[in-house]
Image: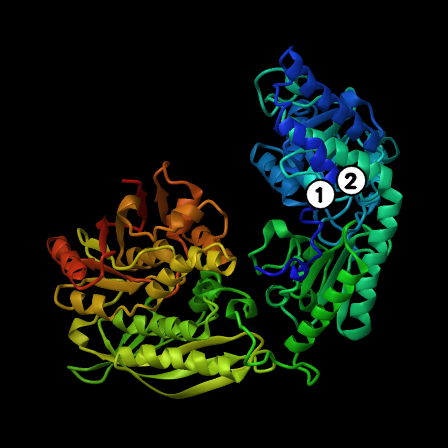
Amino acid sequence: MKPETQKPVYLDYNATTPVDAAVLAVMKPYLEELFGNPSSSHYYGMMARRAIEEARAQVAALLHCATDEIIFTSGGTESNNFAIKGAALAGRHKGNQIITSSIEHPAVTEVCRYLESQGFKVTYLPVDDDGLVDPGDLEQALTAATVLVTVMHANNEVGTIQPIEQLAAICSDHGVLFHTDAAQSAGKIMTDVGVLGVDLLSLAGHKLYAPKGVGALYVRRGVALQKLIHGADHELDRRAGTENVPEIAGLGKACEIAARDMDFNMRHMKMMRDMLHDRLSESLDDLRLNGHPERRLPNTLSLGFGGVNATTLLGQLQEVAASAGAACHVGSEVMSATLAAMHVPSRYAAGTIRFSVGKFTTADEIERAAGEIIKTVNRMRSGDHGSPLQASETVKLTHFTHGLGCACKLRPQDLEAILKEMPVPRHPDILVGMNTSDDAAVYRLDDRTALIQTVDFLTPIVDDPYHFGAIAAANALSDVYAMGGKPVLALNIVAFPSKQLPLEVLKQILKGAEDKAGEAGVVILGGHTIEDNEPKYGLAVTGFADPGRLWRNATAQPGDAIILTKPLGTGLLSNAMKRGLLSETAANRIIEVMSQLNASAAAVFSSFTVHACTDVTGFGLAGHLLEMTRGSGVDATIHFERIPVLGEVWDLISANIFSGGTKNNLDHAAPWLRWDPALTRPMQLLLSDALTSGGLLAAVPVTDAAAVVSRMHEQGMPDASVIGHFNEKGKGTVTILMK
């Protein structure tokens, strides 16, 4: 743990704010002695009710509205859902069109997408290069069928403030309801609903120094909303559920403080924001401001650093806490919808970081953060003014990469489309080529010998360079084992940021790979290196096999048993390890699993009949099994509870830390997968988890399956399991049952 004075500078106030001490003080009594249910008529209930109504008055004062126009919710997302769904469903008899902007938060866009599935038509208004909606575009988009327009007050990523007064006035002239998501603006700038002219306004407590889990919705008198939550007559009979008294009291106090201190806080935040911008602009070139230069939240600074990857930059900024785009959807390398809608060039979009200051930000923190940012950006750029870390400094490799291990592969659907356009070589001695989805090429030298050639390389999946080298080597060698072959020699493939990292780190990567290759009896004979902005390592591996005993992934037979030799979960747990969520024991366990060669498993399989085999890596278990079923023309059934899984997975499976690559895998495989209704979304993601150096997945005659697994257990592979079977001939559909 760092000393108190060494905590990172917090510049992510748009993601969430700390709870104000005065807010916490107001909440505390309702967590202790004043714990009553506000619907009760005795003393404890009356005290709770008094707190709620006082808070309602405080929120109403911030928004300049009547107290009976405030509904308490669980946060901004619920408020948006209630406003948009409630208004759309209540007004459905009038029409089915909803209009919104192309830069809304997912708490709005996902609601609109849902309503599209329910028969509503959604029109998405464009924005200009500063992120502003043109009121003229709204005027043209309105029709007789429009029931609601929803446009955010201020954008969460770039801070641009929309012309809400004009937009709302246009809607009022046409008799159309207008909603604005003010989660980012409430408490930072004026949100007088009378001046704005809105019918509905959402706010979120944790954006204005109240706790997470509480929010409010302003509903103008006379506006009808269909209920989302049914039950008792809480919240003016509009939202059922016993009120969250401590947090509602906290939200009220936070709104009171925000209204009281708004002028001072606006000046202070703008000063801090502009100080940071000035310091960075003075020392760094190729910098782009995203968002309107004037019509912008006083605390928000979205900057595109040309020639720098934002994810990698944030990983290396150990002394600064900020976000790449918006914190609600990190983990994706796709350009944010907001930056795309603003036509931000990809050079700057890829390097965009959102810095957001708050009322507690100090000038000293800005100076410290600016120095750290300038130093790190200079080091990442290919200039002489940068200098690598010293060999004595602790290096965490995962902080120097855009994505972890096999999770950084191209989307399978994109790769598939490219490969379809490439010519397939034809030669009688090509035994395995581009016509299959095997991970290696095989060429017959003579009747007894076939040459196997494969290549695989990764970005770091662990922080330690030695372990990364060992894992990458095991991953590359696995492709030869999965073909029933024996690897004999290899060449290094290295991409390395020598301007950022000391060469001692590369030496340790190579040492880890050399030791793992030596364990496999493989000699590494040199290789090839390039300078890159992130470390990558792998091997080009050569091996040999008997052409008559070659294993492919497209030759499974109906009735075959499906055997998996290693547990799932290394992808999920690697993400957890990067975020500091794993114990040292658990971290060592997954490093051990990923470093384990598949040689022993392949040796056991070689003593039996194997109809098909592959290794489970970047496309996950479901993706690699689909390669087998579709290539073989057979359907399959697997049983979730029979699949080996690392135990620590169950503590983190609901933490939503699967990689973007895992979600791409699941989306790509979806047309061929039939899920048991009992399998939750996280369970489905687990079977699509982008693993690194996973186990072998093999099709063996059902009569041999028990003996194969038993021998593997005897030889130190306790996780080997029969997880299902191949069915009759078909289109390659995979059915996943719970039991």
Q: Quadrant of the N terminus?
A: bottom right
Spatial CA span between label 2 and label 1: 8 Å
Where does residue 224 sit, x and y in percent of width and height?
71, 21
Where does residue 695 sit, x and y in percent of width and height?
30, 62
Q: Quadrant of the C terminus?
A: top left
Residue sitting at the far top: 41
Residue under the image location 32 percent in, 74 percent down: 477
Where does residue 285 sit, x and y in percent of width and height?
77, 74
Residue under the image location 44 percent in, 54 percent down: 668
Query: Is 302 on the left-hand or right-hand side of 543?
Result: right
Q: Examine the image and state in which quarter residue 180 appears.
A: top right
Give the amino acid at mark 1: Lys
Q: Examine the image and state in which quarter residue 437 appears.
A: bottom left
The image shows residue 111, relative to residue 497, as above or below, that is above
Residue under the image location 41 percent in, 62 percent down: 618
**Would you name the residue on which mark 1 appears?**
207
Query: Is 208 on the left-hand or right-hand side of 614?
Result: right
Q: Which mark is residue 426?
A: none
Query: As rendered, which of 117 and 483 lies closer to the eye?
Result: 483
Residue under the image location 45 percent in, 67 percent down: 462
Q: Earlier in the sequence, mark 2 or mark 1?
A: 2
Where does residue 440 sit, x and y in percent of width and height?
32, 73
Callout 1: 10 Å neighbours few (<14), some, many (20+)? many
Answer yes or no: is residue 145 visible. no
Answer yes or no: is residue 488 visible. yes
Its colouring scheme is rainbow
**Would you name the residue on which mark 2 appears?**
186
Give the amino acid at mark 2: Ala
CB-based contact (under 8 Å), mark 2 and mark 1: yes
Query: Is 442 on the left-hand or right-hand side of 316?
Result: left
Callout 2: 10 Å neighbours few (<14), some, many (20+)? many
